[in-house]
Image (spheres, rainbow, N blue to C red):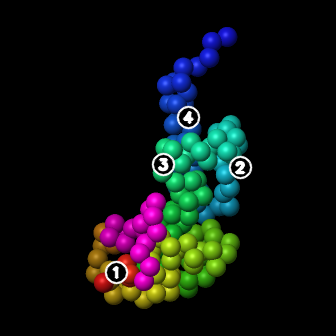
Amino acid sequence: MSSIPSDEQRLRDLALLRRVRDRIDREYVKPLDVEALARGVNMSAGHLSRQFRVAYGESPYSYLMTRRIERAMALLRRGDLSVTEVCYAVGCASLGTFSTRFTELVGVPPSVYRRQSAAGTAGMPSCVAKQVTRPVRNREAPAGEPLLA
């Protein structure tokens, strides 16, 4: 039995990783964990985590949280939900974890972001507001610097 060439295996792994990333993008509200994601593509959790980090520069969990924070930012800009409601609406089970990760990525707590974004994106089309307020990925936001001026 011949083994699969490494280039061919890498291409197969990349296709599977893309499926995992697409699933996270679609199902970010659902409770997703690495084991469940790995089972969905017949990989071990460890292999999935390592390969995902190589391909996308962050762990599957970090990517999931970034998706959730991006959606939370949009909901907070809308202004009709409380921070707690936004937390649960994006699939986070813990307000503390949500607030901590939001602050790490955005640079300000969700409540501050909500107040600032109302003034900073007033009159801006939502598609533009999404681009100019996108969370920082692969590194934390500078502490204490507000996202919007």
Q: Secondary structure at mark 1?
A: loop
Near-viewer residue (117 or 102): 102
Q: Is residue 106 left or right of residue 50?
A: left
Residue 35, label in figure? 2
Q: Are marks 3 and 2 in contact (CB under 8 Å)?
A: no
- Is 12 rendered above or below residue 136? above
Q: Which image quadrant is residue 74 in?
A: bottom left
Q: Amino acid at mark 2?
A: Glu
Q: Residue at x 60, y 58 (%)?
A: 61
Magenta region includes residue 70: no
Q: Which image quadrant is residue 134 in?
A: bottom left
Q: Amino acid at mark 3?
A: Tyr
Q: Is residue 8 left or right of residue 94?
A: left
Query: Which corner quadrant holds the C terminus?
Result: bottom left
Regarding residue 40, the answer to whether it shows in the image is no
Of the numbered discs 4 and 2, the one sitting upstream in the chain is 4
Residue 28 image point, x, y percent: 58, 60
Between the C-alphas of marks 4 and 2, the distance is 16 Å
Residue 6 image point, x, y percent: 53, 24
Query: Which residue has dot 4 on it?
Result: 13
Range of magenta residues: 130-144
Of the numbered discs 3 and 2, the one sitting upstream in the chain is 2
Q: Is disc 4 surrounded by few (<14), some (14 to 19) or many (20+) residues within 10 Å?
A: some
Q: Main secondary structure of the magenta part?
A: loop
Query: Which residue has dot 1 on it?
Result: 148
Q: Are marks 1 and 3 in contact (CB under 8 Å)?
A: no
Of the numbered discs 1 and 2, the one sitting upstream in the chain is 2
